[in-house]
Amino acid sequence: MKTRITELFGIEHPIIQGGMHHVGYAEMAAAVSNAGGLGIITGLTQRSPEALAAEIAKCHTLTKKPFGVNLTFLPSLTPPDYPGYIRAIIEGGVKIVETAGNNPQKYMPAMKEAGIKVIHKCTSVRHSLKAEAIGCDAVSVDGFECGGHPGEDDIPNFILLPRAAEELKIPFVASGGMADGRSLVAALSLGAEGMNMGTRFIATKEAPVHENVKQAIVAASELDTRLIMRPLRNTERVLKNAAVERLIEKEKAAGANLKFEDIISEVAGVYPRIMQGGEMDAGAWSCGMVVGLIHDIPTCKELIDRIMKEAHDIIAKRLSRLAA
Ligand SMILES: Cc1cc2nc3c(=O)[nH]c(=O)nc-3n(C[C@H](O)[C@H](O)[C@H](O)COP(=O)(O)O)c2cc1C
């Protein structure tokens, strides 16, 4: 299937694996790219630019196909060494960057000069337009369903995607709630040129996470995610667990006076314990409502081939019959 996104990134299928903290290692990105999608290494999961350079080098040994790096710009008192990470990306020969969080404007000239294609992930039409205005090549439009940070507008993809299509000139992919061929066809119908998936890719054979995480995803339903940190205007969609229940109680008790320090034990530094250690109640971890649609743990190739076949079947059989 050729779309503006497959053309832009030189990939076979219009399917992207979004950056995921402590999931997006070289093994994950390479498995998705080898299956014809676009795999993405999560930059900040690597503790330093040097560690990211090593992860990029490792990924080059695992795939000859294009892959990208995610750079998440978070508000922080002691920001990571972003210029160093960007240097590691450029020197590592990576030609695709997924930015997320704050506006990446400051770093656009360096990336553009290095011939890097930038896809900015954001949760509103106004931020998508800003991304277009500062020279991003594409946008990943992340609806309210998404795992991770859905923003504060709460607009689901059935509205957000066609609104993005009304306004944007650059191509965009649908992100949040995407799982299968039905999602892909729906995303294309609403004006997207492909789709970005997070949660779905964690439940794959190659995802470098503890088996408990994959089983938790398969066991969960669409009712099992919660929104946390809304009083801090840093809303995150996570899978319900003991730590999240505790955190929500703290939020209720503190109300508008909630401070990050109140919930630090449920959110700070918990990812390695969950993702690699399999301690499923160690803290809050991002997870999308799409868990309700995830029932198995295929390889990335099995997943992507299945999505593409299902999408083709829906278009060629069901929809073409309806149009006849
Ligand atoms: C466990 C997990 C960790 C994530 N970490 C990041 C991250 O570090 N940076 C980022 O830009 N997005 C992150 N995301 C968001 C994904 O890249 C993607 O946008 C989102 O999962 C899409 O929604 P879906 O889960 O419904 O597919 C994360 C998502 C999950 C599930």
Image (cartoon, rainbow, N blue to C red):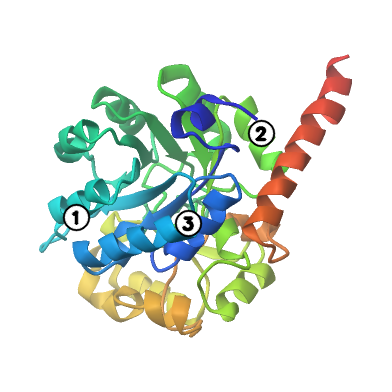
**Residue shown at 16% from the left, 37% from the top:** 110
Q: Nearer the viewer, residue 247 or 51?
A: 51
**Distance of label 3 from label 2 (alpha carbons):** 25 Å
| Residue position marked by numbered label 3 in the rendering | 29
Q: Amino acid at mark 3?
A: Ala
Q: Helix or strand or loop: what does disc 2 sit on?
A: helix
Q: Please tell me how crowded label 3 is: few (under 14), some (14-19), or many (20+) other residues with Cα within 10 Å.
A: many
Q: Position of residue 233 (x, y in %)?
A: 29, 54
> N-terminal of the two: label 1 or label 3?
3
Q: Amino acid at mark 2?
A: Ala
Location of residue 125 by image quarter = top left
- The mark tally for this picture is 3
Farthest residue toward the top?
324
Q: Is 314 left or right of 30, judged from the image as shown? A: right
Q: Position of residue 222 (x, y in %)?
A: 64, 59
| Residue position marked by numbered label 1 in the rendering | 75
Q: Please tell me how crowded label 2 is: few (under 14), some (14-19), or many (20+) other residues with Cα within 10 Å.
A: some
| Residue position marked by numbered label 2 in the rendering | 186
Q: Helix or strand or loop: what does disc 3 sit on?
A: helix
